[in-house]
Image: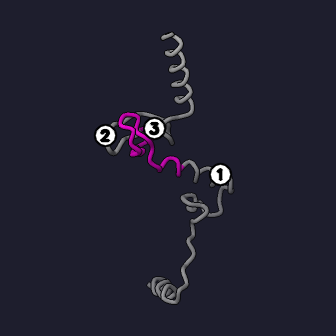
Amino acid sequence: MGEKLENSYLRTQGINMAKRTKKVGSAGRFQARYGVRARSRVREVENLQKKKHLCPKCGKESVKRDGTSIWKCRKCGHTFAGGAYIPKTTQSIDAEKILKSGVENTSR
């Protein structure tokens, strides 16, 4: 309770408390453990994982992660399997390109 009073007193004086996780983001929970590179990698992966992605069915940016490799569009309800941290992995994108070029070559 005393901490809340102290914070409100500082705000009335025009002094703002520092934000503790401005640079480290979600990896702030690890504090000084595991090294800078490991924490920054965790932060990057979690930011990618938590942002909204494009829906392959309706095209709206409303796909969120439901579970490991399970993605669901909040608008149209389309559920599909993808990567563990992003809906489309680099391997799936490469495979789509190969299939697309194969279809174009056969249609000529």
The quadrant holding residue 97 is top right
Q: Residue at x 53, y 51 (%)?
A: 47
Q: Residues within 10 Å of mark 2 (few under 14, many from 20)?
A: some
> Which mark is on residue 17?
none
| Nearer mark to the viewer, of 3 and 2 | 2
Q: Amino acid at mark 3?
A: Ser
Q: Tell which circle, 2 or 1, labels the residue nearer the N-terminal end.
A: 1
Q: Which residues are magenta?
A: 46-70
Q: Residue at x 42, y 43 (%)?
A: 67
- As drawn, 43 above or below 8: above
| Nearer mark to the viewer, of 2 and 1 | 2
Q: Amino acid at mark 2?
A: Gly
Q: Amino acid at mark 1?
A: Ala
Return the residue nearer the eye: 50 or 52.
52
Report the colour scheme.
one colour
Q: Secondary structure at mark 1?
A: helix
Is the Cβ of the residue at disc 3 closer than 8 Å to that at disc 1? no
- As drawn, 8 above or below 23: below
Q: Tell which circle, 3 or 1, labels the residue nearer the N-terminal end.
A: 1
Quarter of the image with the N terminus in it: bottom left
Is residue 69 found inside the magenta-colored segment of the image?
yes
> Which mark is on residue 38?
1
Q: Residue at x 57, y 75 (%)?
A: 18
Q: Secondary structure at mark 2?
A: loop
Is residue 101 found inside the magenta-colored segment of the image?
no
Residue 26 coordinates in the image, percent (x, y): 54, 58
> Which mark is on residue 69?
3
CA separation, marks 3 and 2? Answer: 16 Å
- As drawn, 50 above or below 55: below
> Which mark is on residue 77?
2
